Image: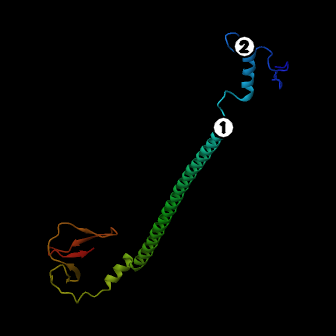
Amino acid sequence: MSGTGTISTVIPAPSAPLVDEQRNITVPWRAYFLVMQRRSGGTAGVSTSDNAQALLLERTARINADQALQAAIDAADAAWQAAVDAEEAARIAGDQLLNTLLAGTTNQLQAEIIRATQAEALLVPLDDLCWLWSQCDFSFLPTTDPGSGRAWNDAGHLAIGSGTTLVDLGLEDASGTWLLEDASGSWQFG
């Protein structure tokens, strides 16, 4: 070796004999062979074509592994995207269903408001109802109880039935009650 710490490119062969009296390799030649071994890349038996074949096999294995990994990544991405698309479709369908139900409920509510408003328009206020009743001519009604819950004219009072009732029936506006007119069990307004 040179004094700079690098390996010298010139390796002089030793001048000592190659083997000693016992036919063993001498120390200078052993050191020379060790230096040659280090410089030539290692022990005997390793060939450049074997190394090239091993590198080719390693390259092929890495390419196959990279392709398998990419296929797995692509499959995972596709599954994730399919799940996202399915969730999006489910949410859109749910929103559309809610909108349809809300529109249906709104339509039903509007229809009920219109129906109730129209029905209330047909109602007659109580004062008007009393006046209308007072204008009615009930002389066509029978003067005795015809039975079966039909109305009859009991001496100028509208009566239904002739049995005895144990309770009074109140008017909706709390202005009075339907009372028994007399012992006959007929009802009178008052």
Of all residues, the one furthest to the bottom in this rendering is 140
Figure quadrant of residue 42: top right
Query: Residue at (66%, 37%) from the top-left corner?
Result: 51
Secondary structure, mark 2, is loop
Q: Against 98, is 182 above or below?
A: below
- In the picture, the quarter occupied by the C terminus is bottom left
Q: Is residue 75 above or below residue 40?
A: below
In front of the other: 164 or 27: 27
Q: Nearer the viewer, residue 18 or 86?
A: 18
Q: Is residue 150 left or right of residue 40?
A: left
Left or right? Give the position of 46 relative to 80: right
Q: Is residue 5 above or below residue 70?
A: above
Label 1 is placed on what type of residue? Asn
Mark 1 and mark 2 residues within 8 Å of each other at the beta carbon: no
Dot in front, 1 or 2: 2
Q: Residue furthest right?
A: 3
Neighbours of disc 1 within 10 Å: few (<14), some (14-19), many (20+): few
Residues 141 and 49: in front is: 49
Residue 152 left/right relative to 51: left
Q: Quadrant of residue 36?
A: top right
Identify residue for label 2: 26
The residue beneath circle 1 is 51
**In 3D space, how far apart are the residues under numbered discs 1 and 2 (Cα atoms)?**
33 Å
Locate residue 44, reporting x and y percent. Answer: 66, 28
Residue 169, x across and y down, in percent: 25, 69
44, above or below 180, in the image: above
- The percent coordinates of residue 185 (x first, y second) are 16, 74
Q: Which mark is residue 125?
A: none
Q: Secondary structure at mark 1?
A: helix
Q: Amino acid at mark 2?
A: Thr
User: Which residue is more in the foreground, 96 or 187?
Assistant: 96
